[in-house]
Amino acid sequence: MLEATALGDGWILRHESDTLPASVPGCVHTDLLAAGVIPDPFLGQGESEVAWVGRRDWTYERELTGSSASSAQEQTDLVFDGLDTVAEISLDGRPLGTVRNMHRSYRFDVTGLSGLLSVRFVSAYAEAEAVRGRLGERPAAYAEPYQYVRKMACSFGWDWGPTLVTAGIWRPVRLERWSTARIARVRPLVTVEEGVGVVELAVDVERTRVEVPLAVEATVGGVRARAEVDGAHGVVRLRVPDAELWWPRGYGEQPLYDVELRLLSKGATLDVWRRRIGFRSVELDRRSDAHGTGFTLVVNGERLFARGVNWIPDDVFPSRITRERYRERLEQAAGAGVDLVRIWGGGLYESEDFYDACDELGLLVWQDFPFACAAYPEEQPLRGEVEAEARENVVRLMPHPSLVLWNGNNENLWGFRDWEWEPRLAGDSWGEGYYLGVLPRVVAELDPTRPYTAGSPWSGSWRHHPNDPAHGTHHSWEVWNREDYADYRLSVPRFVAEFGWQAPPAYATLRRALPGEALAPDSPGMLQHQKADDGNGKLERGLARHFAVPDGDFDRWHYLTQVNQARAVAAGIEHWRSHWPVCAGTVVWQLNDCWPVTSWAAVDGDGREKPLYHELKRLYADRLLTLQEEDGGLVLAAVNQGAEDWTGTLTLRRMSVEGEVLGQAAVELAAGRRAVARVGVPHELTPAGPKEYLVADANPDADGLRALYFPVPDREVLYPTPRFEVALTPGGITVTARTLVRDLLLQADRLDPEARADRGLVTLLPGEEVTIGVRGWKTPDAETARSALYCVELTR
C-alpha cells in the first residue's frame, strides 16, 4: 500500500549566509514577517518597504533522512503540490530538476537518496525578464512582466492589489513510498443518462514491475465495478440507478456521492483514490436569436439567470488561506444570494477546499485559465508549461459538480482588438493559439462534460467585436471609468461578466491597516491602499453626480462612497435582471479582496461586509421589485426567479418627502416561475421634482418587497432633517423613523471592531421601524449606537 509522509516541518529559509525558520506551506514574505525581518506589508506603507524581497533569490532547506519503512517499498517519490515559481531542487547535492510553474505539481524519484534537500528559488522577476529578453516585448495592462512566467499574475500588483512578488513552497510537500504500481491519474467523467448516474473512471498507473497483472475496483452509491488494467491504463464504468441530481443553490439540493477507486494486485490494495462527485448536466446555450447571440447556463435542463460574483485570491499570500477561511468567504457569497462564482484569470486554480465548499453550498464555479490583461507569448518554454498545467488542473477539478464552465482568459481577446495591441505585436504570438487552440482541445479531450468559452468578454467569434453586448459575454467598464451609473440602463447585454463600482473598506479595517493616520481620501496610507488609475478621482466624480461631496468630513465621505457603490451596482442588476431572458446573468466585480484596500469588493480585505454586500441580498433574491424608466414613462418590473408563480396585489404610492400621500393605486401582479412581469405606472402617480418619490410595495405574502424611485439625484432632493429614535433590543437595536430616513446604515464596526450588523442600507418612511441585529458588540448602548448610524441628508 502506498505510504505518504508529510514534509511540513524542519525547514529553514536561507538567503546568502542568513537563515531563519520557515513554514511549509508558506512563502518568503510570511517567513520574513514571522521572524520580524520585514514590516507587515498590509499596514501603512509597508508594501513599498518590502519591494526588495521579490527581487532576491531564496533557498529552502531541510534534512531528508531514510527510514526503515522505505526499505519495504520499491520506490520513493518526493512530491510537491505547488512551488512558487522558478526553482532548482537538489538532494544531497544531486540535481533533481528545475521547475517554472506555480500552477503545477511536481514528482521526483528519490529512491535510496537522503541528505540535504534544497529548493532554490530564483526571483520571478529575473525569470520573467529573461523570457521577455528572448521572446520580445508583449503589451499588457500593467508594466510588470507577469505574462512571461506561469505565476499568479496579481502577485505583480493589480488595480486592487499590492505588488508583492512571492516565492516559496506554497502547497504541501510529502514523500510517497510504493511498490509494484501506483495510481498516477484518475479522470472521472460524470454524466446522467435518463435518470441513471454514470461514472466512467479512466485510470493511468505508474509501475515498477510491468509483468504483474493489475485491476481497478470502484464503488459509488452502493454500486461496485471492476476492470483489468491494460499496461498502464484501465477504465471502469459504473451506473447508479435513480441518482439524485445535484442542483445550484436555490434550485434544489446538493447530494454528493463518495467515489472510491482501488488499484489491486493479486487481491491486495496498492493505492486508493477517493473523491466526491455530484450527478448533474450542464450546457451553455449560445444560440443566435433576434437579440444577438445568447449566453445562458442550463443545469439539469433548467435555464438560469446567473447571480454571480467575481473571485480573486483571498490573500496575496495564498498559502495563508485555510479551509475555514474559504468556507467563511463562500458562505458569505451564498448568504448574499449568489449562485455563481467566477474564478478570475489573474489568480489561481484554487485548492480542493474551495471547490469542496462550492459543491456543498451549491455555488456554480466558472473557472478561468490563468491568463489576464496581457499578450502572452506562445513560444517555449511557456507553451509546454501552459498545456501541462491545463491538463493537470482540468483532470484535478473534474470531480466537482460545482464546476460548470472553463474560460480561456480574462480580457485578452478584447485587449487585442481595442487596446492597441494588434499594431504593436506586428505578427508576434499573443495567446490566441492558447484560447482558440490548445485550451479548447485539452478540455474537449479530457472533460467533454463541460462547456468551454475562449475568453471573457467574448462574442463567440471574430465576426463580432469581442465585447459586443449583443453577443456572448460583456464587461461593462466604461460606466465606472467615464460615465454615470445610470448609463447601465442604456443597453441589455446578453451576459454581464464584469461590472462594478469602488468604495473604501469598513472603518475598522482602515483603522487597523492605517494605524495612527489622520484619515482623509488623499492621506498617504489611503493613497497607498488605492491602486486604481485615478481611483479617487473616479470616486469623487461618481459621487458628485448624486451627492454634495463632503469637504473635510472623512466619515461622511466614507459613508457616501459606500452608499454610491451599492446604488451603482443596484442600478445595473435591477435593469439587467428585469430583462431576463435576454440578459442571462450578472457577475459583480468583485466579491472579495486580498488585502485592505479601496476596491470594488463587497467583502473587504478583513472579511467585513460593505453595504454593497447587504444590497446584493436584495438584488439577488428570488423575487425583486424594481421601478425602471422606459419609453418616457415608469414601469414596475417584478422579477421572479423562484419555482412558483408570483401573484398578488402591489400598492403604488406617490409620496412627498414630508410624508404626505399624493396619490395611490393597487395593481395586480402575475409573474410566472423564472419569469418577469411588467406593469405600467399610471401617469398620475409618476413623481416629479425634488420633493416627490414613488414607493411600490408588495403584499405581506411577498415578503414585504419594496421598490423606490426618486426622479432627481439625491443632491437635488429636498430631504427633511432626518429624525429617528433608537432603542436597544435583544441582540441589536430598533430604529423608529419620524421623518423620511433615506439609506440608514449602522456601521457596527464603529461600535466594536468585532461587531457585525445583519443588514445594510434601509430606507424608512415616517412611522416605520427596523430592527438591526448586531453580534459581537460587547457593551450595548443606545446613544453609542446612534453615533454609528448614518443616513442621507440634505446638504447645501
Image (cartoon, rainbow, N blue to C red):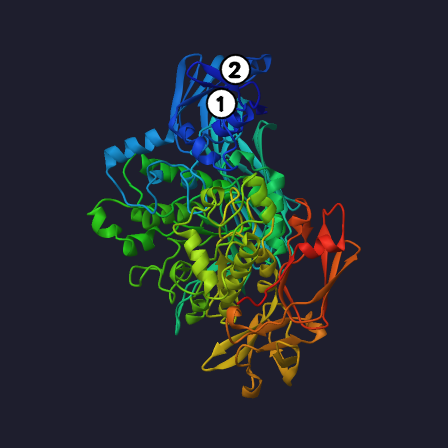
Q: How many marks?
A: 2
Mark 2 and mark 1 in contact? Answer it, CB < 8 Å.
yes
Q: Answer with left or right where residue 6 lies relative to residue 108.
A: right
Residue matched to label 2: 64
**Which of 209 and 645 lies nearest the eye of the viewer?**
645
Q: Residue at x 45, y 23 (%)?
A: 108
Q: Is residue 325 above or below residue 269?
A: below
Q: CA distance from mark 2 to mark 1?
A: 10 Å
Task: Tell me what residue is drawn at x 59 percent, y 67 percent.
Answer: 641
In-image side of 225 versus 366 (left or right): right
**Quick one: 131 or 713, which is closer to the camera?**
713
Instruction: Give the residue at the far bottom of this rendering.
Output: 684
Front position among marks 2 and 1: 2
Residue at disc 1, secondary structure: strand
Q: Please state which amino acid type lies under the numbered disc 1.
A: Leu
User: Where the N terminus falls, by quadrant?
Assistant: top right
- Res 371 quadrant in image: top left
Q: Residue 607: give x, y in percent of width and height.
A: 59, 46
Locate residue 590, reporting x and y percent. Answer: 50, 52
Label located before the other in sequence (2 or 1): 2
Q: Position of residue 476 (x, y in %)?
A: 41, 60
Q: Is residue 783 left or right of residue 604?
A: right
Where 682 falls versus 745 (above or below)?
Answer: below
Q: Residue 78 bears which disc, if any?
A: 1
Q: Secondary structure at mark 2?
A: strand
Q: Tell me which amino acid carries mark 2.
A: Leu
Farthest residue to the right: give it: 730
Asked whether residue 208 appears in the rendered view, the answer is yes
Q: Residues within 10 Å of mark 2 (few under 14, many from 20)?
A: some
